[in-house]
Image: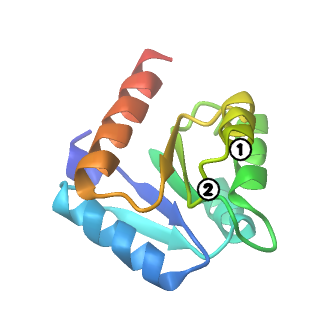
Amino acid sequence: MTTSSLPILVVDDYATMVRIIRNLLKQIGYENVDEASNGAAAYEKLKTGNYGLVISDWNMEPMSGFELLQRVRQEPATANLPFIMVTAESKTDNVIAARKAGVTNYIVKPFNAQTLKARIDQALGNAAAA
């Protein structure tokens, strides 16, 4: 699968952040991007869609990105789906909790296209090895 055709689901309740991530993805060559405004909406899309990567915010209602990650890891169909958590908080406890829950990678806001590309490359490399 070529980079530009990899289906990516961006999950954030802040429309501006979704737009920023979409623009960064476009800059680094990813064109096939879908979005969801919270974890619950993303979970529904993941049940019907065939995504190659999830990029999710942590803090959302009614379902947080962390809760979404936990559900994704519990489902056999999505258990190995590369999942990048995006958050404004770099608390060690959050990073540890996300790692224990099976997050593939973690990005602290603000970030740029190079950081996003590096995390995606790592996540997809990790997923390919899994």
Q: Is residue 104 above or below residue 40?
A: above
Label 2 is placed on what type of residue?
A: Glu
Residue 31 makes an appearance in the image: no
Gap between marks 1 and 2 measured at Cα: 8 Å
Task: Kindly identify the residue that appears in the image at 31 percent across and 47 percent down.
Answer: 115
Q: List the residue tagged with mark 1.
A: 94
Query: Callout 1: 10 Å neighbours few (<14), some, many (20+)?
Result: some
Task: Identify the image quadrant of the N terminus.
Answer: top left
Residue at the spot 27% in from the left edge and 71% down from the top edge: 23
| Residue 58: % across, % down | 66, 58
Disc with the residue nearer the chain's start (1 vs 2): 2
Mark 2 sits on what residue?
Answer: 89
Above or below 89: residue 53: above
Q: Residue at x 69, y 71 (%)?
A: 41
**In percent of the image, x 36 and y 25: which residue is there?**
125
Residue 107, position in %: x, y? 48, 48
Nearest the eye: 11 or 51 = 11
Quadrant position of residue 81: top right
Q: Residues within 10 Å of mark 2 (few under 14, many from 20)?
A: few
**Number of the label disc, if any, that sits on residue 14:** none
Residue 32 picture location, percent across and down: 32, 62
